[in-house]
């Protein structure tokens, strides 16, 4: 697993190299909408996933 769908725009986000899907607890950035997300992963499974900060979204 090296990609995850954005919870807002549903587009796949490729994990940056600093993210280890087996053990990660921190931020993830959606470049489509400039959204800061928070994700917690353990053993390639998503434990927590939420939007941290909504910036201006023009829909
Ligand atoms: Zn997104």
Image: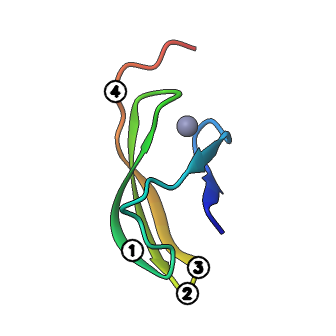
Tell whether label 2 touches label 1 (CB within 8 Å).
Answer: no
Camera-nearest label, 3 or 4: 3
Camera-nearest label, 4 or 1: 1
Q: On the image, numbered disc 4 is attached to which residue?
A: 55
- Which quadrant holds the N terminus? bottom right
Distance between the Cα atoms at labels 2 and 4?
A: 30 Å
Q: Earlier in the sequence, mark 3 or mark 1?
A: 1
Question: Residue extending furthest top?
Answer: 58
In which quadrant of this rendering is ligand 1 seen?
top right
Disc 2 crowd rating (10 Å Cα; few below 14, some 14-19, many 20+) is few
**In the displayed structure, does residue 44 sit left or right of residue 39?**
right
Tell whether label 4 touches label 3 (CB within 8 Å).
Answer: no
Disc 4 crowd rating (10 Å Cα; few below 14, some 14-19, many 20+) is few
Distance between the Cα atoms at labels 1 and 2?
A: 9 Å
**In the displayed structure, does residue 11 sit left or right of residue 18?**
right
Q: Which labelled disc corresponds to residue 44?
A: 3
Q: Which labelled disc corresponds to residue 43?
A: 2
Q: Earlier in the sequence, mark 4 or mark 1?
A: 1
Answer yes or no: disc 1 within 8 Å of ligand 1: no
Q: Which labelled disc corresponds to residue 24?
A: 1
Camera-nearest label, 2 or 4: 2
The residue at the point 58 percent across, 79 percent down is 44
């Amino acid at each position: 697993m090296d990609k995850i769908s954005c919870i807002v725009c549903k587009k796949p986000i490729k994990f940056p190299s600093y993210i280890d899907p087996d053990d990660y607890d921190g931020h993830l950035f959606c470049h489509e909408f400039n959204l800061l997300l928070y994700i917690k992963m353990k053993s390639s499974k998503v434990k927590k996933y939420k939007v941290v900060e909504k910036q201006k979204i023009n829909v």
